[in-house]
Amino acid sequence: MSQKMNPLANPRRSLLFVPGARLEILPKALASWTDIVCIDLEDAVADDAKDAVRAEAISVVADRPSDEKTEIWLRINSVRSAEGMADIIALAEADHAPDGLMLPKISSPEEIRILRDVLSAKHSDLKFHPLIETTEGLKWAYEIAKSSHKIGSLVFGGFDMSASLRVEPGWNSLLYARQQLVLAAANAKVDLLDMPFFGLDDPDGLREEADAALEIGFTGKCAIHPKQIDIINDVFSPSAEEIAKAIDLIAKYEAQDKAFVEIDGVLMEKPIVERLYRTLSIAERIES
């Protein structure tokens, strides 16, 4: 592959939630071939257990194998809550951080900047993944996505968003919110993960919703059970034909010196080339 290649750090096709109070199932989650495991310290943990679960989760992160390719995120509590502040302080004091933080109920870019200032000194590589799940967060999504170089993706919290919008959590009722996040994520050049599909015994419904999310611009989807991962990865992975075409187009583009050129009927310019590079980075992840 060309030396000009600059793929994204890790493809983020699938994310599997693990309840923070059930860390014994983490090995099963890591074995599911998901791209991301997100340990939930927020909704999945009772208030009186948050301190103990937080400490255990941070310890698990510190003990992870160095060659583990699956990203591990922590879904912390809202930064506007005492529990969220405790999460942030504990992470700021920890020697090891997860690969990313999912940030629930984010409603302004200023919250991201505060987190950046608190955590960057010790954990410079830590990525932030705002969970957009309120109307206020949706209103500021464009600014949130570009608020820091530490933003790795946006995540659509559709279930809470439906309550905030006073609608049922169906595809049509949440389409406008999804489209606004597609615009915000694409403009900031970050990944965008769709909400989970809650029909555990409806694989056809999962595939249909994942296909629809891909079609409008999402790059991945969250899951609540390991059996959903194969379908999600399949939908958000390039086909063999797409991979071969990307390799061919990139090779031909890099063999000439124009920034904007038509190659095999495709108008090649920077955004198109970046999209092709992303296709190849996902292909490399699948091979590995």
Image: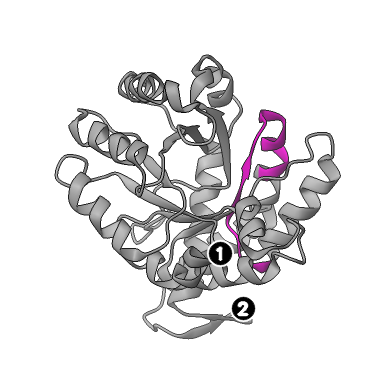
> Residue 239: horizontal and vertical position, in percent?
68, 53
> Callout 1: few (<14), some (14-19), or many (20+) C-alpha neighbours within 10 Å?
few
Mark 2 or 1, nearer chain start: 1
Q: Secondary structure at mark 2?
A: loop
Task: Please say if the residues under marks 2 and 1 sit with CB atoms less than 8 Å apart.
Answer: yes
Left or right, residue 12 beside residue 174: left
> Residue 1: horizontal and vertical position, in percent?
43, 53
Looking at the rendering, which quadrant does residue 168 occupy? bottom right
Magenta span? 216-232
Looking at the rendering, which quadrant does residue 107 occupy? bottom left
Looking at the rendering, which quadrant does residue 8 occupy? bottom left
- In this view, the residue farthest toward the left is 121
**Looking at the image, which residue is at 58% across and 35% down?**
16
Residue 248 is marked as 1
Q: Can I make out residue 148 in this image?
A: no
> Callout 2: few (<14), some (14-19), or many (20+) C-alpha neighbours within 10 Å?
few
Q: Is residue 221 highlighted in magenta?
A: yes
Closer to the camera, 257 or 118? 118
**Looking at the image, which residue is at 56% across and 68% down?**
182
Marks 2/1: CA distance?
Answer: 10 Å
Amino acid beneath label 2: Asp
**Looking at the image, which residue is at 43% across and 66% down?**
189
Residue on which disc 2 sits: 264
State how the image is colored: one colour
Left or right, residue 5 beside residue 117: right
